[in-house]
Amino acid sequence: MKTTISQASNHEDQTVTIGVWLANKRSSGKIAFLQLRDGTGFMQGVVAKGDVSEKTFELAKNMNQESSMYITGKIVEDTRSPFGYEMQVSAIELIHEATDYPITPKEHGTEFLMDHRHLWLRSKRQHAVMKIRNEIIRATYQFFNVNGYVKIDPPILTGSSAEGTTELFHTKYFDEEAYLSQSGQLYMEAAAMAFGKVFSFGPTFRAEKSKTRRHLIEFWMIEPEMAFVDHEESLEIQEQYVSSIVQSVLENCKLELNVLERDITQLEKIQTPFPRISYDDAVEFLKEKGFTDIEWGEDFGAPHETAIAESFDKPVFITNYPAEIKAFYMKPHPTQSDVVLCADLIAPEGYGEIIGGSQRIDDLALMQKRYEQHNLTGPAYEWYLELRKYGSVPHSGFGLGLERTVAWLSGVDHVRETIPFPRLLNRLYP
Ligand code: 4AD
Ligand code: MG
């Protein structure tokens, strides 16, 4: 009977066949231990000289890493492995013999591994990170579906900029100028006026010359947008959403978290409500902590965010930033006109900003004024103003960066390991 490693536990004491690759092996005169993977998981196959033909034993002993085969044997409990089962191999049908697989079990440098990303994805650690990414995506759809949101897909080719013009990828759209989307937000606002509560999930592009462990050129964002929801209500949705994905990963990715040696006690603390600190208080706090360089009106850098996050063991909202350093669409605070109704959510353990969100300006005249101040001219922006002309309502939304969230939950240092094929400042290959 044909099955998979993930299903092996349902076949205890039965003889099954699984299509696998050889991840690693060790052998002595009488026994070979094959580390097998099939995409669904990793499992050990034990080939004992007395149990198989001479030819099969020789094959098992001499097979190269990443060779593919159909392997047949009995599934038995293996209490020493976290997976819990192994196979007592009775037959091997070689499909393809691999030669000189470049990623050996020894240590390799990061650049070498990045150059071989198409193969590196097969490794146990990368497999675990991608499974966690998949679980976050699954839990995201579940959270928003259960709560009555409609999934809406904004365009990727656009004629307008959502987050300022400096980080746009330009392209030609026949005879017109076009950009790759930095954020679907403006379109999601239109969608919220049509469907009430909406969310998107898609790739976004930033031509940012940043080379940090938190920046990708192409990254995936989840962008919910809600009509009739103010800033405070949006913060509650954000904390519920983030804690729900953390709980899903804890529940459904135990093996993966174990492979990554993630300290899950840190993740178990992620329950609502999350702490909030205003930008004003954050500046005072940083000055007290000895950051003499920071002045009111300046944006925070990674060290500032980390210092603030370190005083909490949950994600923390930094609210109400100065209007000057935030996007044109954010609604001014009702009593403090130089700050806006927004928040960045900073992950614990130094993983930085995972969410940027705000209440949006719903007043036509004020939005027109912002257009002038930000030099947003031309027909590409007109449709967005019309949303304020026909039944404008208070509305809020936010964007969660998937890769930074994967990095945080997986406990990996750099976002390059959190997306299958990272696009970095100096990398478009593979
Ligand atoms: O804070 P940002 O720029 O917000 C927006 O784009 C809003 N329009 C979202 C909205 O309100 N609908 O980006 C949102 C999040 C950040 O908090 C961060 O997690 C992630 O996207 N992000 C990046 N992730 C990886 N690499 C980059 N270069 C990123 N830039 C932003
Ligand atoms: Mg931001």
Image (cartoon, rainbow, N blue to C red):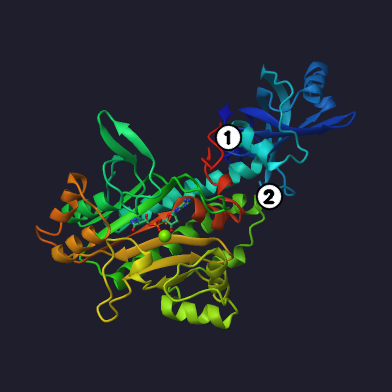
Q: Position of residue 180 (x, y in %)?
A: 35, 40
The image shows residue 376 at horizontal and vertical percentages of 24, 53
Residue 378 appears in the figure: yes
Q: Is mark 2 within 8 Å of ligand 1?
A: no
Q: Secondary structure at mark 2?
A: loop
> In the image shown, does 362 or 80 lie closer to the viewer?
362
Residue 247, numbered label: none
Q: Quadrant of the C terminus?
A: top right
- Tell me the amino acid under the disc marked 1: Gly
Q: Is residue 247 visible to us here?
A: no
Q: Nearest the camera: 294 or 253? A: 294
* Circle nearer the viewer, 2 or 1: 1
Q: Nearer the viewer, residue 293 or 428?
A: 293
Q: Residues within 10 Å of mark 2 (few under 14, many from 20)?
A: few
Q: Where 73 sits versus 195, above or below?
A: above
Locate ligand 2 by image quadrant.
Answer: bottom left
Residue 101: image quadrant is top right
**Quarter in which the N terminus is drawn:** top right
Residue 7 found in image quarter = top right
Viewer-closest of 379 and 8: 379
Residue located beneath label 1 in the image: 39
Pick whichever of labels 2 and 1 is earlier in the sequence.
1
Locate residue 285 relative to residue 98 in the image: left or right. left
Numbered mark located on residue 82 in the image: 2
Report the Cα–Cα distance between label 2 and label 1.
Answer: 17 Å
Q: How far across and how far down the image is residue 212, in percent?
A: 57, 53
Residue found at x 56% / y 50%: 211
User: Residue at image x 60%, y 38%?
Assistant: 8
Density class for disc 1 (Cα within 10 Å; few <14, some 14-19, many ≥20) is some
Which amino acid, by three-letter code, is at mark 2? Pro
Q: Whole-percent x and y of residue 168?
A: 38, 45
